[in-house]
Amino acid sequence: MKKTHEQKDPRFKIAHKEALIGIALAIFQFVWWYGFAYGLGSKPVKEYAYIWGFPAWFFYSCILGLILIIFLVIVIAKWFFTDVPFEDDEEEERS
């Protein structure tokens, strides 16, 4: 039976988990942006509410969404991602 990369090297399991977290963050950011941009932005312009001079849909989808996603990326990178060495242990043992 042929071994896969994941069976040989545990770094692949970590990389796959972190890739899925990254994809989940991207999907969350898109849903956040889409929900506020088209949810609040679908009204007639005369009915818009404004925050700091920006339409509420723009403030929540673009400004607050950017701040939120930056915060989430920092938190996830600091507490959920693992520092993995790039060197292969087998190459070090051969040297």
Image (tube, rainbow, N blue to C red):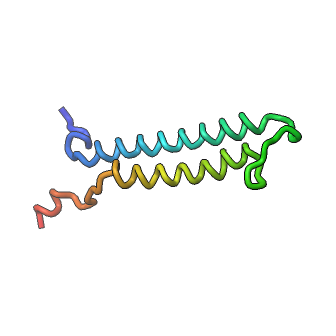
- Where residue 17 appears, x then y in whole percent? 35, 42
Name the residue furthest bottom: 95
Q: Position of residue 18 (x, y in %)?
A: 37, 46
The residue at the point 52 percent across, 54 percent down is 70
Question: Quick check: 84 left or right of 27?
Answer: left
Decide: is 91 above or below 36: below
Q: Quadrant of residue 45?
A: top right
Vertical arrangement, residue 21 with respect to residue 78, above or below: above
Q: Is residue 32 left or right of residue 13?
A: right
**Depth check: 60 or 28 in front?**
60
Q: Please identify the quarter of the rendering in which residue 46 is found.
A: top right
> Where 47 falls versus 82 (above or below)?
above
Question: What quarter of the picture does the N terminus occupy?
Answer: top left
**Which residue is nearer to you in this view: 7 or 23?**
23
Q: Nearer the viewer, residue 14 or 31?
A: 31
Residue at 30% from the left image edge and 45% from the top image edge:
14
What percent of the width, then of the height, locates residue 81? Answer: 34, 50
